[in-house]
Image (tube, coloured by chain):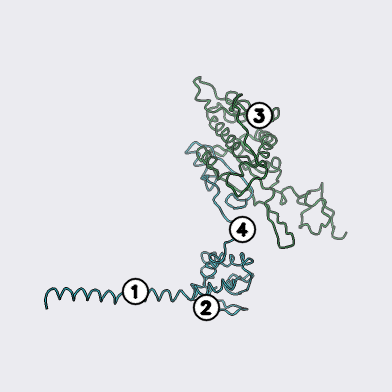
Amino acid sequence: MSRRAINILSLLAIVAGTVAIVPVFAQSDGAKRSAEFPVKGLINERINQNIVTQPSVGDKTAILGARHLVPADMSKGRVEMPVRSLLFDKFKQPAEATKARSVVAPDSVAVPVPPPAELRLKAPAKAVGSSQKPSLKNRNEKVEPGKVRWHKMVQTAMDASKQSGKPVLLFQMMGHLDDRFC
Amino acid sequence: MFSDENVAKEINDKFEPVWVSVREVPTVTIDFGNGHKIKRTLHGNVASYVLTADGTIVDILPGLYERDEYVKQLNNLFWVHHYIPLSRNAQVFLADYHREQAQSIKTSGKALEVRPFADMSKMAIEISTKTILRPPGWSAGPKSGVKPTATVEHPDFSKPGELAHWRKLFEDTAVNERERRGPVHAMLLAHPGAKPADVTKQLYREVLHADIDDPYLGLGETLFKDYPFTEDNPEGASKASLGAKHSAPKHSQAI
């Protein structure tokens, strides 16, 4: 076999190897997508059906428990509450948040096969983001208190004043300057 | 106001700013009974204190001010603070300052202006209220011809900057300067070396007319006095807000 023929064969072998590897990556990506797809599908389906979750009164662990059919325009608070509670519980009471996953829906609308617990926790948040913009009318969300560089505490401002020689400006108010409606 | 670039720059350059809440702001919700509800804040009020590094009050701007006047007044107070260590006696200097301001507001309805850079004068002058305070309008000059800012009665709040031209804000500013600053000066004159905690309650009760010790902020008389269905009133409302003078009839549920 000539040297040229050997080179060509080597090149062909490399190309064939690459082609063989690509489907492996494609398959792993496909596997990921195939795991995600049903969850996304479920979320989208629930959005379309206007199904949102509502926590049971006095029972934070049942956040994903009761499910109700409500019109989309009525669902703002009902959507937000589970998300806030989830975030709150997740950071402050991890044990309780974990417990929440095992709660079974008490009364209910037929729900498709539940997704894995970890993904189920994320579902309401995705639903909020994709289905509707949160209205600001009834919420007093936190905002930047203007462009002034406020000290966090009076004592800090006084300490800074000692250093800089500038007077302290103490803005005193009812309500909170970083509330949207103050 | 604090979102305005110029106001923020002025404050950031000249002050060490901090904000505090004295209590939650009361809100009122009207339910129209047809699914429509509106919610508004009620009786909220503010005060801007200028303090020395040890927390002594230099002066207070009571209530909300329109942008330009707020910056002007803060600038005046910046200079008062600047002159304190240059005076012979800080406490006497501040007492003189409050006395002369109270007098000026009483006689002319306007506060005196503070002369900037008085200590940079070629003539070595002693810093006192006489050398730093000037009549109202002094900085604008007699022939300045400065046009008053155009005001809008119903601004479009969706547009940035519109709030600054709101007529009500200008009217409030005028009321603050004409009717509220005088009592503030009198109060600070009576409490030399006062810290915010020493005068806050008095300020809100007597100057801003929102008693923060009263659960109903002093609105009890208006809310409960002539309201016939006393059983609707919250428990203790009459005692807390009306006092002995205007107490609601006892056992009114039986009537």
> Which chain can be seen in green?
B
Is there a contact, CB below 8 Å, between mark 3 and mark 4? no
Disc 2 marks a residue whose amino acid type is Pro
Disc 1 marks a residue whose amino acid type is Phe
Query: Which of pointers 1 and 2 lies earlier in the amino acid sequence?
Result: 1
The span from disc 2 to disc 3 (Cα, nearest Å) is 75 Å
Disc 4 marks a residue whose amino acid type is Arg
Position in image of residue A75 (x %, y %): 62, 67
> Which chain can be seen in cyan?
A
Which image quadrant is residue A100 in? Answer: bottom right
Q: Are marks 1 and 3 on the same chain?
A: no
Q: Residue drawn 82% across and 57% down?
A: B230
A74 relative to A164 in the view: left or right: right
Residues packed near mark 4 inside 10 Å, few (<14), some (14 to 19) or many (20 plus)? few
Is there a contact, CB below 8 Å, between mark 1 and mark 3? no
Chain on which label 4 sits:
A
Asked which secondary structure carries label 1, the reply is helix
In the displayed orientation, state which residue is furthest to the top: B123
Position in image of residue B212 (x %, y %): 68, 47
Residue at label 3?
B99
Asked which secondary structure carries label 3, the reply is helix
Position in image of residue B246 (x %, y %): 82, 48
Residues packed near mark 3 inside 10 Å, few (<14), some (14 to 19) or many (20 plus)? some
Is there a contact, CB below 8 Å, between mark 1 and mark 2? no
Q: Are marks 1 and 4 on the same chain?
A: yes
Residue at label 1?
A25
Which image quadrant is residue A74 in? Answer: bottom right
Q: Vertical placement of B246 versus B178: above or below?
A: below
Q: Which mark is residue A114?
A: 2
Residues packed near mark 2 inside 10 Å, few (<14), some (14 to 19) or many (20 plus)? few
The span from disc 1 to disc 4 (Cα, nearest Å) is 46 Å
Chain on which label 1 sits:
A
